[in-house]
Image (tube, rainbow, N blue to C red):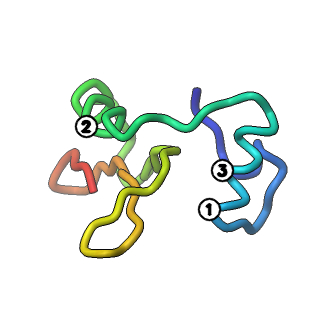
Amino acid sequence: MKLKVGDLGFNMVNWDQIEQRVGEVGLELCPPEVGPYLRLAYTGQPKYKGLVIGMKPILIDGNPTVFILDNWSYGLCLN
C-alpha cells in the first residue's frame, strides 16, 4: 500500500509520529527487505519521484536510515 504522510493526517511530522499512527490505523511497517525487492520490481518508477520505504530505521554508521527508491537521470537506484 502506498501512502503519503498526509494520508495519515499529518502535514509536518517526525518518524516517531508516523510509526505511532501506522499502528493506530491498523497497519504495519514494511520489513527492511521490501526496499531491495521493490527496487528490482518497480521498474516503471517516474523520474525524480523518490519513494521512501515505511520501515523501522536501521542503523548505518550509527545513523537511523530507511531505504529510498529513486529514479535519477542516470537510472534507478536504492539509497
Q: In which quarter of the image is the N terminus?
A: top right
Does residue 30 appear left or right of residue 79 in this picture? right
| Residue occupying image coordinates x 72% and y 66% | 13
Badge 1, how many Cα within 10 Å: few under 14, some, many 20+? few
4 or 54, which is in the foreground?
54
State the image coordinates of residue 23 (x, y, percent, origin top left). Answer: 73, 38
* Residue 19 marker: 3
| Residue occupying image coordinates x 61% and y 32% | 28
Q: Quadrant of the C terminus?
A: bottom left
- How far apart marks 1 and 3 lie (CA) works out to 6 Å
* Residue 36 marker: 2
Indicate which disc, 1 or 2, sits on the residue closer to the N terminus: 1
Which three-letter amino acid code belongs to the residue tagged 2? Pro
72 or 2, which is in the foreground?
2
Which three-letter amino acid code belongs to the residue tagged 3? Glu
* Residue 15 marker: 1
Tell me whether the residue at label 1 lies in contact with that at label 3, contact meaning CB atoms closer than 8 angstroms.
yes
**Dot 3 lies on which element?**
helix
Q: In this view, does 36 lie above or below 16?
A: above
Q: Which of marks 3 and 2 is in front?
A: 3
Which three-letter amino acid code belongs to the residue tagged 1? Trp
